[in-house]
Image (cartoon, helix red, strand yellow):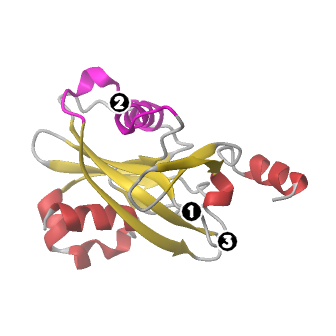
Amino acid sequence: MSNAAADEATELHKNAAQDVIAVDSDDNAEGTVNRLDAHTGDGIRHRAFTCLVFNEEGQILLAQRAPNKRLWDTSWDGTVASHPVEGQTQEEATEERLEEELGISPDQYSDLRVTDKFEYKRYYENAGLEWEVCAVLKVTLEDTSLDPDEEEIAGMLWADYEHLHDNPEWYRQLRLCPWFEIAMRRDFE
């Protein structure tokens, strides 16, 4: 990417200047790459996570991605997804994103855990792609107080997780993010 193109991309997308961790198919780190480069062209396989947030009644919190997101804008995620940075564990990165996106602090839960990992590659319109080795984390909120950042989250709703899984056709209008659909399908296998 040229310097001018990188500067323009950074202006348009605040996270474009960040690096993500490139990985092989077994999630072994292969150095860092620019986040925008990892999500354009043919893409670069990189480490990511998605965290499924539940309440004590077993409902999942679905979060609608903000309209300013470059990929899967206004799609519904279950619940946050992002990328750890070099030197950061999946749990540390997840704790950070829960707080930044939803205002959820670690004192609201005690069971954050990694439950799965998978690789996937999906293209989004003409805007880019995700090619990730994605860890799945789960957490149950003991305190469901939320303070969403409107730059990250456009909407929120609690849904019965099992009902959502068993009746995906009833939720099509939500346009679920592909990584969440994969994580949910694998969770029930």
The single residue placed furthest to the right in the displayed view is 4
Tag in front: 2 or 3: 3
Is tag 2's residue or tag 1's residue first in the polypeptide sequence?
1
Front in this rendered view, residue 61 or 8? 8
User: Measured from the top left, where is residue 136 in percent x and y?
Assistant: 30, 51
Prevalent SS, magenta region: helix
Q: Magenta stretch: give its range.
A: 87-112
Say what amino acid the circle numbered 1 marks: Leu
Q: Is residue 89 left or right of residue 29?
A: left
Residue at mark 3 to residue at mark 1: CA–CA distance: 13 Å
- Element type at mark 3: loop
Q: Is residue 60 left or right of residue 79?
A: left
- Element type at mark 1: loop
Residue under label 3: 41
Say what amino acid the circle numbered 3 marks: Gly
| Quarter of image, res 98 | top left
* Residue at x-position 84% and y-position 57%: 5
Q: Is residue 117 left or right of residue 6?
A: left
Q: Is residue 117 left or right of residue 189?
A: right
